[in-house]
Amino acid sequence: MKLGPAVAVAALLTIITACGSDTSTGAEAGGGGAKVGIDHPRADSDFWNSYIKYVPQMAGELKVDLMPATNSQNDVTKLVSNVQALTGQGAKVIVMAPQDTGAVATTLQQLENKKIPVVTVDTRPDKGKVYMVVRADNRAYGTKACEFLGEKLGGKGKVVQLQGALSSINGRDRSEAFLECMKSKFPGITVFSEPTEWEGSKAASMLQTRLEQNPDIKGIYMHAGGVHLAPTLQVLKQKGLLVPPTDPKHVFVVSNDGIPQEFEAIRKGEIDATVSQPADLYAKYALFYAKAAAEGKTFQPGPTDHDSTIIQLPNGMEDQLPAPLVTKDNVDDKALWGNQVN
Amino acid sequence: MTAPAPRLRLARFRDLTLVPVILLLLVVGAFLDPTFLTAGNLTNVLQQQAAISLLVLAEAMILIAGKFDLSLESTVGTAPAIAVMLIIPVSAGGFGLGLPGVLVIPLALLIGAAIGAFNGFLIIRFQLSAFIVTLAMLIIVHGFLQGPTEGKTLFQLPDSILYLGSAMWLGLPAAIWIAGALFAAGMFGLGYLRAGRSLYAIGGNSDAARAAGIRVDRVLYGVFILGGTLAALAGILETGRLGAIGNSMGVGWIFMVFAAAVIGGVSMDGGKGTILGALTGVLVIGLVQNILTLIGVSGFWQPVIYGGIILIALMISRIAGGKAQD
């Protein structure tokens, strides 16, 4: 039996799958500007897929000369090699979203030595120079969710927060801000924190167990609507707790992300609010600042023309984009990105 | 077929080496939290473990036959997702073929069986390493979830696929009945049926099994196909429990599956272990997870405690079993 070809094919398949360079084409935009290289952080979450879809569209609108995007699949070593490949292909500006904010420092140092400005999206690197960080304030997400739940519950009772991965800065920020706000503003509320690792299966099991132990839980904060929404609704439905807000048995649910399915659930009265993380603005301003960096523009700390504030960091600047709280009152607002995609 | 006629022997109790661990967990859990020993909580534990237990059942059979399948965890998400996409319209993220909704479960099982058959084909026909083949298949099969869905969660599902994972039969979740019935069938099959007994012969020494007249290749194909089908069924149950198919469904399960099978006394080298033992392994894992959630151990430290308890369970099972593990 000839094993050679079969082994070769299997090896090849593994390499192709593991290598993970996403060769989705960038928008063909002229303008003769500098080439912008972009690396996407992952391809398996609803939020990031919306962002990835917005990138070529915004590049067209802003006339950015975008190179084919790479995808580092939530792995900082892939991010490093992708960035090397992009600079090797002549990128003059790099847009990236490092999910590991510490391990990216050396890469940032190398890019600084090559005089290649870097725009990071969603996360703020701990060390290494960045031209601009484009993100919403994740601590504000946690605080907004806390204030909403605290008011709905009248400052007493029990709530659950379904946490993301504790190794991610955004997950930690949401979690810590939520806990701090509850402690200082609503000391009468008990918080249970469930480490779900962004996994629906764990979220469902942990929430089910917690509700069995404390049937009087009245509020839930989900750190990621994409993974937590369906399991939470399924558990509440099974327990007979999926009832309108007017019913005394209602459990108040605040989500985070702002995907269309969350808006649908808000309209149906199944959940009460979500923090809309602006996928469209992430893409737009990442490319806006990339273009500005190529043109050598500089920015000052202070309010901007798009309802955000630029703050000074030790290693660069950060444009803190607004992340509105969406409730039944404003869920049909056309400006929300969740209402623009399908 | 020369396997001795099975009969009840005292030695069979070594399948039950984890029973002391389960009793210990029940006692400790009852002390730590008053909710733990309620019927509602224990039902929840069984429901939460139903899907993964089917993977343990499949993996136990494959390990007993002396093979390996890592790709089962990817089948959990991919089989139901592709089946769903064949049915739902394009607007909901499907392929737009418009197949009727009743086909979704048969299609998912068929896809699982096909993945198992392909694994078997590579491993048996080409004599490739089962470990590496199924490692590659783990990546590829998960890619077939991420590719067609473009990473999006499938929210709009046909009602038929949600039924099994969320229905109640005679006061208990249907998933518990299904998993229970399949484990009973597995215990009977591996204990008393010719094909089931032959798994031990093949896992112990496949050449000797062949010489004894067992159709080794055919039995192994059967085990891989059954494994893929059970993984697809696990995916169907999980889909019903979660109400949506996300891209991370099943990811990372395989470590828990191996932990459950091995602390339950199934040998990684083949030929040894029982389905009942594997079941006790699943129960230990489920009870530990439940207790950690109930007492609210800090998320930063849960992995340490969780892994530590698996090690302790392994040691207790070694002491109670009295035999070296391999």
Image (cartoon, coloured by chain):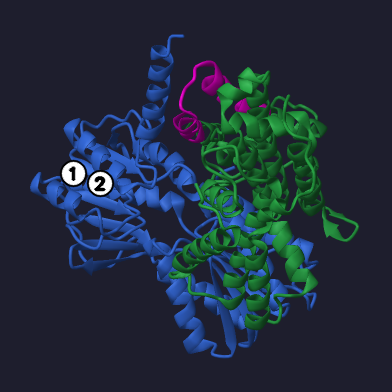
Residue reaching furthest top?
A1
Q: Amino acid at mark 2?
A: Ala
Q: Which chain is indicated by disc 2?
A: A
Residue reaching furthest right?
B170
Local secondary structure at mark 2 = helix
Which quadrant does the N terminus of chain B fall into? top right
Q: Residue at x 78, y 66 (%)?
A: A239
Q: Are marks 1 and 2 on the same chain?
A: yes
Q: Residue at x 50, y 30 (%)?
A: B130
- Disc 2 residue crowd, few under 14, some 14–19, many 20+, Cα 10 Å: many
Q: Nearer the viewer, residue B110 or A96?
A: B110
Residue A65 percent across, percent down from the top left: 27, 34
Q: Residue at x 72, y 27 (%)?
A: B2
- Relative to A109, say whether B24 is above or below: below
Prevailing SS of the magenta stretch:
helix
Q: Colour of chain B?
A: green
Residue reaching furthest left?
A113
Q: Nearer the viewer, residue A247 or B195?
A: B195
Mark number for residue A290? 2
> Which residue is labeled 1 in the image?
A294
Q: Magenta segment range?
A: B113-138
Q: Nearer the viewer, residue A323 or A96?
A: A96
Residue B154 percent across, percent down from the top left: 63, 43
Q: Amino acid at mark 1?
A: Ala
Horizontal side, residue A118 vs residue B293: left or right: left
User: Chain in blue?
Assistant: A
Q: Which chain is indicated by disc 1?
A: A
Dot 1 and dot 2 residues touching (CB under 8 Å): yes
Residue reaching furthest bottom?
A188
